[in-house]
Image (cartoon, grey):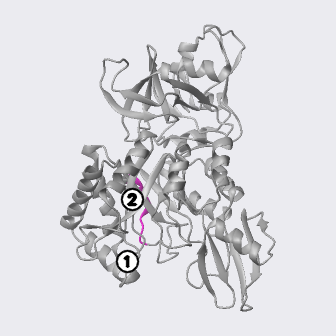
Amino acid sequence: MWYTVVAGDSLYQIARRFGTTVETLVEANKLQSTDLNIGQGIYIPPVPGRAFQYTVRAGDTLYGLARLFGTTIQALAELNGIENTTIYAGQRILIPFYTEVIVNTPMANVRNGPGTNFASVAVMQQGARLPVVGYRNGWYQVGLFNGTFGWISEDIVTLDAHDSIRPVQPIIGFYTLAEGPGLPGSYTSFADNVSQLSGVYLFFYQISRNDPTQIDRFFQFTDQDIRVIVAVAHRNNIKVLPVVHNLLYRPGGTALARDLVRQLVSSPQNRRAFAQNLVQLVERYNFDGVNIDIEDAYTEDSENLAQLYVDIAEAFRPHGYFLSASVPARISDEPFNPFSDPFDYATIGSAVDEFIVMLYNEYGWPGSPPGPPVSIPWMRRVLNYTKTKMPWYKIAAAVSVFGFDFNLTTNTSSYVSFDRAIQLAEQYGATIQFDMNRQTPWFSYTDGQGQQHQVWFENTDSIRAKVQTAWNMGINGIALWRLGMEDPGIWDMLANETVVKKIIENFR
């Protein structure tokens, strides 16, 4: 929630008013001093499980409070059940943390001004959710998937104002095509759950093995396939990004992946050429930006690799395109793991709009002992480090919805979807347990060859724990790898126990 500084305010007074601390406000706003200016916007981080309340003073009006707290009269009235604009001294009112409107007609125009005489800039379908940032003469100003703003008539939407009792988080879904019976595609999961997604990121592109400044298609798909996904997403106010990665080269593997990155980042000319090719990719398909997923690199290339994100950001900025990075998990500045050591969190975090920390390398790597893809202690450890390197609003946590079947006899592992994990448990009569410390389900079984297995996977309870942890730690979203492998129950959980927030880049 945002608060506008008025005459006589101090950080101490603001902290007391909202039940937080001066230190928390300084950290959340990256303040260099405790001096404040009248009219300055101060972000008030939520206190998990507690709503913001304000005690009305003599002379207060809903109009004044709406301006003070960066909300609207309509949101204040809706959240508090106020049927007219009358409030009285001593009254306790809830302050909206996040407000949205939901389209209630089959199709709705979003316009570039508050009236039917203004041009349409987007068309939304019934059920589309749009974050509210203002109101004028019967029209809500709303945030759109591409980072711009528009206006929609109050006659064709339902207002929904939310406090901070439930987690309010963006939910991103990574989208893939099918890779066999155990690795299903994402379309059905995406299309069935558009109301619970803020962004869909398409794992469809690879840094070219022939020229790393170029971008190749990964998987077989047509231009029409892309346009259908983009159209469905945009009609539901969902941001769409292509994922461009350096993974799964056959032949070549990780050695080729690292060599290609070295060549790509070795010169300003190569980095700029790659950035311009990304711009062309966005323009060709009406994407909203790009997600860069580089996971194999040489530590010696760290400085040039970080500069790649800076150069892409410079190329994107004039167009208003969104730059997202998926980055391997680190826990300190010290060398920890050659997989994550090449990534300079501070420089990359400064350049990008969104920094997705990929948490799912705790277990499951070659030779790994059995364990969860992402445990809660590991999640906290990585995010605590990440928060020291960049603002909270850039950070999202990528968590798995899949699991691993660890063969303890051969010391190997394989992916399992939620459905496959449940099938294995039923087939071998295994009892599913829940590790309360790691907040992850698991079970053991012995296969037909007498080999011992341990399966760790994700279900609704474990994803709930990760969403709540992200909220408690004050970051800005959860990313699910990958749609189609999840417990279907997570979608009801997200709908009933959280508020799925659309991604808005323009923080004050």
On screen, 360 above or below 452? Answer: above
Instruction: Decide if residue 367 is on the left or right side of residue 121.
Output: right
Q: Is residue 387 visible?
A: no
Q: Is residue 325 magenta?
A: no
The crowding category of the residue bearing disc 1, from other C-alpha atoms within 10 Å (few below 14, some 14 to 19, many at least 20), is: some
Magenta stretch, main secondary structure class: helix
Considering the image in quadrants, where does the N terminus appear?
Answer: top right
Q: Which mark is residue 224?
A: none
In the displayed image of the protein, which residue is found farthest to the left? Answer: 269
Q: Is residue 344 magenta?
A: yes
Total numbered circles = 2
Q: Circle 2 sits on which residue?
A: 348
- Image quadrant assignment for residue 212: bottom left
Image location of residue 495, percent across then percent down: 63, 43
Residue shown at the point (69%, 55%) measured from the top left: 465
Residue shown at the point (65%, 12%) measured from the top left: 83
Q: Please report the bounds of the magenta region as a residue range.
A: 342-350
Q: Is residue 360 visible?
A: yes
Instruction: Decide if residue 126 is on the left or right side of residue 49.
Output: left
| 386 or 232: nearer the viewer | 232
Image location of residue 376, percent across then percent down: 67, 61
Q: Amino acid at mark 1?
A: Tyr
The crowding category of the residue bearing disc 2, from other C-alpha atoms within 10 Å (few below 14, some 14 to 19, many at least 20), is: many
Name the N-terminal-most of marks 2 and 1: 1
Image location of residue 52, percent across then percent down: 66, 30
Q: Secondary structure at mark 1?
A: loop
Q: Amino acid at mark 2?
A: Ile
Q: Circle 1 sits on which residue?
A: 298
Q: Are marks 2 and 1 in contact (CB under 8 Å)?
A: no
Q: Secondary structure at mark 2?
A: helix
